[in-house]
Image (cartoon, coloured by chain):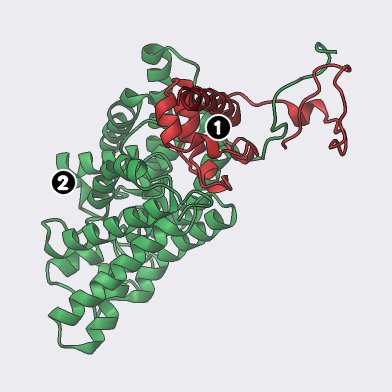
Chain colours: A red, B green
Amino acid sequence: MMGRALSNVAMPVMKGCSGITILSGSEVRRGEESACIKCAKCVEACPMGLEPYLLAKISKRKGWEAAEQNDIVSCIECGCCQFTCPANIPLLDYVRLGKQSVMGIIRSRNAKK
Amino acid sequence: MANRFFVAPAPHLHGEMSTVRLMADVIIALLPALVISVKVFGWDVLAVTAVSVVSCVALEAFVQHFIVRGKSTVGNLSAALTGLLLAMNLPSNIPLWIVVVGAVFAICVAKMPFGGLGKNPFNPALAARVFLLIAYPQQMTSFVAPSVEGAADAASGATPLAALKAGMLSACDADYGAMFTGATAGSLGEVSALALLLGFAYLLMRRVISWHIPVSILATMAIFATIYAGVRFEDSMMHLYLPAFHLLSGGAMLGAIYMATDYVTSPMTKKGMLIYGVGIGVLTMCIRLWGAYPEGMSFAILIMNSVTPLLNKYVKPRRFGSR
């Protein structure tokens, strides 16, 4: 679920690497994204008590301030939201994007002080 | 390598949940109620259901193709489910052209103008039901008497709730067995509490919905009815019968299990769901006891639908590690 994808054979293996998983094509294929039906399964799945549907929507629109207010930096990137999403929305992709942007903003804000 | 392998960020797996499957599950959960309905009211039921489903699906396909000009969304079964839920809210002897008017309202007014599935603020099937109730009150409230033996109290074709409102029936004398199994007059889907509870069990088992909304609605209604009976009536039998009557009559079960739990128009958080459920329960009982209509479920759900965005904004889940 949280493993890093190997994009080429030159990827280094570090001490913390416990194994390499190879998944078949049908297992990894991403379904076609459809409209959010607000089923709240992502909210239920999130172990951190966040609202992935909201964070993904905000990140898509680059609303970094709202993302920070909704605790996007608390996301542990476990991917449970995306796993459970019936509409096949790549929630974690969007949340990760938003989290990185927000963390960058926070860092530059702290650097100014 | 990049050509032969699909490389994407984690998570690399996806669950088996899909929009189509969820919609199909709700449709499956409604089948027992449909079967009971056919048994009680005869084949008219299937005609109403078929017209409703077909016109909803056709209208959605039409709007999507000619007005939205997007990819067809009929395949996600949401239009079929809307059609089925709309049929569940209509009397079996309703003229079929009114069913089509209801489908037009559900799809072309309540659903598609807002952006289709996932963006409609109000439950389309319920919005259509309320529209029909106001536009065609006579056709919407004349029910046929059930054709099952042993349904002595329903010969007039009045629903138990309407009879109670008109003072023709006391909650102590109602035939609870008939109300539980479906041998009363009423809309297609609302007559049998047993069939609806079966569907509820299936939905819970498949984890399509959680218990929060239905249980909070029904519990609120029961508590409200108990307090009302306690204040209003001396007779202690009434204190027991009135809550049971309100839970089993009218659209209480259908509304609480199938209409209020509509994903799109219900809150996202568990806490929000409980507030939403309590709101629906209180509003339903207020309309039933003091309002002009015998049935208040559909109005209550629509009113709480409009509160949902507010609940989503202010009722947040507890962040891990916070108080």
Chain holding disc 1? A
Q: Which residue does the image show at 44% across and 53% down from the upper left?
A: B270
Query: Could you say whether the residue bearing mark 2 is in a helix, strand or loop?
Result: helix
Q: Residues within 10 Å of mark 2 (few under 14, many from 20)?
A: few
User: Can residue B85 be seen in this snapshot?
Assistant: yes
Q: Is residue B281 above or below residue B245?
A: above
Left or right: residue B239 versus residue A79 is left
Q: Secondary structure at mark 1?
A: loop
The disc at residue B253 is none
Between A73 and B208, the one lying in front of the other is A73
Q: Which mark is residue A87?
A: 1
In the image, B196 versus A72, the foreground residue is A72
- Is B145 placed above or below B227 here? above
Q: Residues within 10 Å of mark 1 (few under 14, many from 20)?
A: many
The three-letter amino acid code for the residue at tag 1 is Ala
Which is closer to the viewer, label 2 or label 1? 1
In this rendering, does residue B170 appear at all?
no
Chain of the residue under label 2: B
| Callout 2 amino acid | Pro
Label 2 sits on residue: B137
Q: Which image quadrant is residue A67 in?
A: top left
Determine whether A26 is above or below B31 in the image. Answer: above
Identify which residue is drawn at 85% across, 33% down: A21
* Residues tagged by mark 2 and mark 1 found on one chain of the structure: no
Q: Position of residue B301 (x, y in %)?
A: 29, 49
